[in-house]
Amino acid sequence: MKRIVYREWRLSPQRYWGLLAILAAIAGLGGLAFAYMEHEGHWVTGMSNQVVWGTPHVFAVFLIVAASGALNVASIASVFGKVPYKPLARLSGLLAVALLAGGLAVLVLDLGRPDRLIVAMTTYNFRSIFAWNVLLYTGFMAVVIAYLWTMAERKGNSYTKPVGFFAFVWRLMLTTGTGSIFGFIVARQAYDTAVLAPMFIAMSFAYGLAIFLLVLMFAFDQDDRPIGELVLFRLRNLLGVFLGAVLLFVLIYFLTKLYGAKNYGLVSFYLIDGGIYTKVFWLGWMLAGILIPLGILFHPALGKSRPAIAWASTLVILGGLCSMFVIIIGGQAYPMQLFPGKTILESGFYDGVGGAIAAYSPSLPEAFLGVGGVAVAMLITAVGIRVLQFLPESLADKDVDPHATATA
Amino acid sequence: MSNNREHVNRSRRHFIGTAAGVAAVTVAPGVVLHSLAIAEPRSEGVTDDVRWGMLIDSSKCADGCDACVTACNIENGLDLQQKPDGEVESKWDRQVAKWIRVVKVQDNLTERVSNLPMMCQHCEHPPCVDVCPTGASFRRADGIVLVDRHTCIGCRYCMMACPYKARSFIHEAVEVKLTRTPRGKGCVESCNLCVHRRDNGESSTACADACAAEGNNAIVFGDLKDPDGPVRKALAALPSRQIREDLALNTGVRYAGV
């Protein structure tokens, strides 16, 4: 195999600074939204005492889940020893760190007391999965940065495999921890199930890879580096398999829930009569986020089209945001079963009167904060690939796999 | 020369005398307040010799009465919360903090209607305490579940985890508050069984007093560990249950007639 040559992103300064300016402007809007919410209080958002986690959490959890998934490409190269993935490993590590930073920024800036971040970093209740996640998230950053170092520095090359393995195990723990934030909530019917942990892992594989594919295709397209079919189609097939895995876990989730009579109402809320949540589940998550991308990726003609693959990745990302909306906000909007066998006629605190679902309308500041997190992640990535050698010169088939040239 | 020295000494004496006077006047109130402050034996921690709790008899909870809610609001300064300018009334009602609410339920089969107040159930194994990342949500030795407002970061995970939806987040800047119930934007709070009354050695809660004053006596407050106390006697006389008994949280608030 040829030696892989990595080069900084050679975009013309006008386009590069233009891109940075756009990303910085979006991140800045997120910052302004944070300042507004922090100054006024959360009354300016759509969140309430019924729906306590809103749009910022949709973006934050999506980014955190995608972060661990973005690392997969590197893991396939160094843990499972697949040669064609090796040139992609650096970008995979960088994206993982960038997405996590963006997600954490949103999560932290939505806190009621963001000024007390130091309390969260120094005072732990280890019965709380949240406390574990603080360590898992910060630890992930450190492990992946070390992993990147072993890849970039010749002296560290011999450590790539063990550190890569460690990072792989860590990312599995991280997504398990993120899924368990919801899985451990015994109070709410939509949660309270261990299947959410592996479901989040499957989602992380898919969402992280979709973002990776888009960033890779965009970055390579901008400075005319070639991506061969060998790499692209492998990643495409992998994305299809991951989407299938998500579908399987969604099926298991509903079959598990459906087996208990107490959950009939919940399943019907998600699948039949839950208003916006049912619509977003079917149209956003299932159709746009999984079925259409699967159709594109495995279509004999479309599956070979680069724009089609890019569109499929985009749909997976949008579907991913829809999945978080359905899980996080839908799960809270569905009323808690305080009195099984009884109907709540009146309540001073919106306890699902007559089975009513809790109201929630996302506000602009919330959306800006969430999108700001995405911009932060992309900003870190753009600067990273510009100033450091993250991108390989070429992913053309002959440069990735010597056997490809032999058969060509 | 000697005259001059005498003059200096006199002015120095005068200065020292004035300084001592000013110092005494400055320090004295602090000393007095300090001695007052340490006079109260509040430094003694609460013990698990008692476990505070309640029995709520919904058959006595009168339809249309919200005396407990009003009393709680006044006792804990919840009535002092102000709707921010520009906020929509209906949204504000979903955001304003409420520690206790009246719920009216109807049995699906028998159509029997009951009223009951719901609040923090002061569980022995509170899910809100389990999930709190910083340990701000905690359970006192005497069974009261509280939020430490110095370590609450406002993540709202406890609100996600509470099976009774008993907690409220402070969505707005707080202008006016009571000394006994500190409150601040961005923290979570809930019923604390009138913890200031417990610490002052009083025997009841605002909601129980208000219910009794209405003549309903639906709320009986007391020590769940005292076999001769009012709660245990009432529990012995009536069949009672815990809300969401399946979660086995061993709640401190029990209900009869639901």
Image (tube, coloured by chain):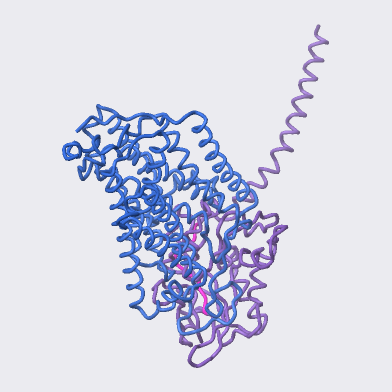
Residue A275 visible in the current orientation? yes
Could you tell me which quadrant the N terminus of chain A lies in? top left
Reply above or below: A255 against B36: below
Residue located 37% across and 61% down the image: A290
Residue B246 or residue B179, whichever sits in front: B246
Q: Nearer the viewer, residue A284 or A194?
A: A284
- Left or right: residue A316 versus residue B53 is left
Q: Nearer the viewer, residue A329 or B194?
A: A329
Residue A139 highlighted magenta (yes or no): no
**Which sits in the foreground, A127 or A55?**
A55
Residue B226 in the image: above or below residue B133: below
Start and end of the magenta stretch?
A: B45-55
Q: Which chain, by letter, is purple? A: B
- Residue sitting at x 41%, y 74%: A267
Tell me which residue sits at (63%, 79%) in the image: B211
From the rendered image, report the letter of the chain displayed in blue.
Answer: A
Residue B201: quadrant of the picture: bottom right
User: Farthest residue toward the bottom?
Assistant: B110
Q: Position of residue A152 (x, y in %)?
A: 30, 30
Whether residue A345 sits left or right of residue B254 in the image: it is right
Q: Main secondary structure of the magenta part?
A: loop
* Image quarter hosting the C terminus of chain A: top left
Question: Residue shown at 21%/32% (left/top)?
Answer: A158
Magenta-drawn stretch contains B51: yes
Q: How many numbered marks does the figure carry?
A: 0
Query: Is residue B143 shown to the viewer in this render?
Result: no
